[in-house]
Image (cartoon, rainbow, N blue to C red):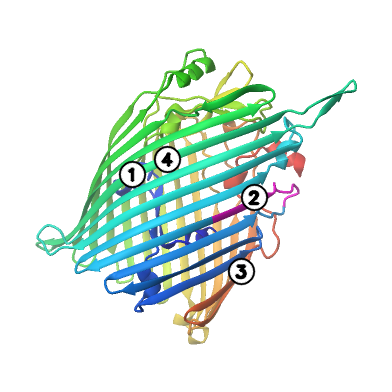
Amino acid sequence: GAITSIRRCFDLVEILKGGSSALYGSDAIGGVVSMQTLQAEDLLKERDYGGLVRTQHFSVNDGFAGQIGGAVRSGDFEFLLLYAGRTGHETKNNGSIPPNPVDFQSQAILANANYIHGEHRFELTMENYQRETDIDARSATTSTFKVFDKSVLNFEQIQRQRVGLKWKYNFASTWIDHLESHLYLQKADTESLNQSRANDVTIGGVTIPGRSRDQKIQFSTDLLGVSSLARKEAYTGEIKHNFIGGIDLSREDSENRFQREDTAMPTVKNRISFAPSTTSRYGLFFQDELHWGERLALIPGLRADYHQIDPSVSEDYLERLAALDQNTITPPEAYDNFTLSPRLDINFKTTEATRLYAGYARGIRNPSAEELSMIFDHPPAGGSPVGAITIPNPKLKEETSHSFKAGYKGEAEAGRFELAGFYTFYKDYIENSVRTGRVDDDGRDILTTLNRGKSIIYGFEASGEWNLGSSISRLDGISVGLSAGRAIGINRTEDTWLNSAEPFKVVSWLGYDDPAEKYGLRMTGIYSAAVNHVDDTTNQGKLFRPDAWFTMDLSVYWKPTDTFTVNAGLNNIFDEKYWSWSSARRGWASRWQCDG
């Protein structure tokens, strides 16, 4: 479902694992997901016109999705227009507690125009996206610490508009072979409306109206940026160089607003959760891919970044800050930071089909404007009957990582395989919603954001696929594969486990593809080990520990013509009851035990 959703308006999705700050700057400390917008030429191929029609149904949430669009070419011009829409409901599950009812719908419009003139290519892309979600939070009306026992409804709307202009030019010069520059503007708005109601109460024959509360939270972000990338291929003696260099410049203005009408509390208008801020980023990077002959390659890279956050602190914000913690919180100040992010990769081809590789990268993540100045009220939930409040930490500093990797991989007609190990050392990890051990005058837990000392994550990944037809002609089209991975995370400062590390997991499959590519099927099995390494101090109460589980999925496709394909899938064939650790680690064991 996630991949299909991404591909509505994108033609290519690339996932880069590991520290990637040398090329992408701050926030790429653990990797990058890169998406390439669908272009007119992707639908046109060698034709002057082309189109796309696709529809999907997802039984897991009774959802429907569809895309329709077309492209035309006229002389040096290419045009594309694409619409994508999706509707659905809450995700069905095998739990004993029914999920909260959810209705959602989204739609996106993508327009793209290209002009090609000689070695020049100009691309204008415009995108409009919006999503609406309605949630009936029935779990809040039946929880142990319920405040609103009649209804809790939440409505969320996300809107995003983006315009980008790109220029690509193939040079015939001494210094540059290819130049690519990109100017972009994005505006994103999120609005959340919460309506909570309590039942009327009758005392001594007198009916007291139930408590009523309406809350609206709005976030707005405007982003303006420009980037430019240059490439050059050159030789120095026996060494071949592929140079890459570029700049990244951007300015982001973010602000928010909070409003509340509550029959049991004073009305709040135009209150902010974090100080309106301007975030400026300036990046300069350079990389050289050196080749000695056909076997050895060395790839050094370096990026320099200057990160600046300027909060606008109003008198209302300072008064609220002073009332929260008896004037012990320092107001946010301007944040600025200069960083260097080096990387080094080595590749050695042991044979034509196999190679050894190793690499190092330094990753960085600067604190966000919200983390530096956020003041946020959390409603009653879980083990806290009165809720909690997050206070800002203007003393935050950058989070850094040192990532090491090594592996051996191969790919040929018979199949592919890879075995890799990784080790990452984190320092000053930025963690949100950390309990300070204090409470305010209303008894609410005081939370904040902290740099959390040192931690490590290490593990391995192994994968392989064998095309049986390469060895036995009668089995042409049949393939088997397996992928496994294990990560272990340790908080070195607290001498405990990191809950963000996933348990050992294995994915195996058996598939068949018709040699004529007209039809095919794949059976996939997924095994996840039980969760044993848990840090219970990150929450109130003991965290739930999922047991091991195994699921089976079946997917098929039929392609009667080159332009028409039917895909179908059956997930969790044996109706296995299981929990994903990435979701379950947010819950308490006592709640899961009580609810079965």
Q: CA distance from mark 1 to mark 2?
A: 41 Å
Q: CA distance from mark 1 to mark 4?
A: 10 Å
Q: Nearer the viewer, mark 3 or mark 1?
A: 1
Query: Which image quadrant is residue 50 in?
Result: bottom left
The location of residue 444, given as percent across then percent down, is 62, 22
Q: Is residue 374 above or below residue 410?
A: above
* Boundaries of the magenta span: 95-106
Residue 271 is inside the magenta segment? no
Q: Nearer the viewer, mark 3 or mark 4?
A: 4
Query: Which image quadrant is residue 265 in?
Result: top right
Upstream in the sequence, badge 1 or badge 2?
A: 1
Upstream in the sequence, badge 4 or badge 2?
A: 4
Q: Which mark is residue 569?
A: 3
- Answer left or right for 267 relative to 250: right
User: Given contact means CB atoms under 8 Å apart, are the residues at marks 4 and 2 in contact?
Assistant: no
Residue pictured at 50% horizontal, 60% vertical: 3
Q: Is residue 22 above or below residue 538?
A: below
The location of residue 345, given as percent across then percent down, is 28, 53
- Per the image, label 1 sits on a secondary structure element best described as strand
Point out the image quarter for the N terminus: bottom right
The residue beneath circle 4 is: 221
Q: Which mark is residue 224?
A: 1
- Answer left or right for 436 relative to 382: left
In the image, farthest residue toward the right: 205
